[in-house]
Amino acid sequence: MQRLAPALRQDNVPLDLISLIKTILAATKEISFRVSQAHLGGLMGSTLDENIQGEVQKKLDVVANELFKDILLESGFVRAISSEEEDTSVAGDEKGKFVVSFDPLDGSSNIDINSLIGTIFSIHEAIPGMDAEDPAQFQQQGNKQVCAGYVLYGPSTMLVMTTGSGTHFYVLDRTHGGYLLVERNVQVPKDTQEFAINMSNQRFWQQPMQNYINDLIAGDTGPRGKNFNMRWIAAMVGDIHRVLTRGGLFTYPADSKKPEQPYKLRLMYEANPMSFLIEQAGGLAMTSTGRIMDIDPNDIHQRVEVIMGSANEVEACLSYYK
Ligand code: AFP
């Protein structure tokens, strides 16, 4: 099995980006260890704080964020970072070539039940001549990402990453401490009979999504003429990993639960990196009105509607909005 650095060189990834990726992965190895220790390290439960989005922070969220922040800002490769757990972007090295957005621990509600969680990251080149302090560094579309990935802290610790030459799976080999390539050029099957959505929000969805899901549930007695299965891990990393592994449709649609906040998932460190991975694996990553990676970001914590996965199923879903 190939080690990470030669696999990246094979994809012609520039050396400075390889160095940054290795820096990010150093942090994930420590997070993987801390997650596996959980109760033993006294890291279960919540802090007394909320992040800027009003969500209660778990102790592990905070530890993972500090680890990432420190390692990235000390690396010299990074002009600025933005994180789910930071109110604003944080300046790094003025000469840093990259900006990094990340969700240090996605799926926090799964921490206390010893279930799937992961780290999501997205890398853009810094805008030439723009100050590290300037939050406009992050106003770049997803289609400008030079690398995106996630690390899943499951039964094995897996890295799923793209630098624009396909989406590849790696596994952390604890015997030598590095990530090994286990599957190159993963492909999301075009068709699927599996979907992932938080059904408890059904009454708050717009009518097209209500109609689409009703038709999936009707199965072989409805217009789709086939039965569908539903899965929901409540951590986007876990749900997208399943879609990348065996296909499926994942959606977090617009809803009217909180009128001031019609969308749940965050563009910069959830939707954009997952879109890059899904598209590089032959899937589609859309809102009901267009491609996610073509959205012009206006805020580091911007939220967005998400419909992604198996190409033909995403098209089928979008046809209800026409
Ligand atoms: P947290 O990491 O902030 O807990 O949120 C996880 C997440 O943003 C995403 O990973 C899930 O798909 C989604 O929330 C699940 O949310 P609900 O189960 O509350 O609908």
Image (spheres, helix red, strand yellow):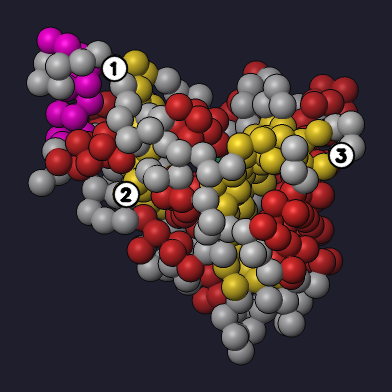
Callout 1 amino acid:
Phe
Q: Magenta includes 134? A: no
Q: CA distance from mark 1 to mark 2?
A: 21 Å
The secondary element bearing badge 1 is classed as loop
Residue 6 lies left or right of residue 270; in this view the side is right
Quadrant, the N terminus: top right
Q: Magenta includes 207? A: yes
Residue designated by label 1: 228
1 vs 3, front mark: 3
The span picked out in magenta is: 206-221
* Residue at the far top in the pictured view: 221
Task: Say whether disc 1 or disc 3 marks the residue closer to the N-terminus.
Answer: 3
Residue designated by label 2: 286
Residue designated by label 3: 177
For residue 183, which quarter of the picture?
top right
Residue 166: give x, y in percent of width and height: 52, 51
Q: Main secondary structure of the magenta part?
A: helix
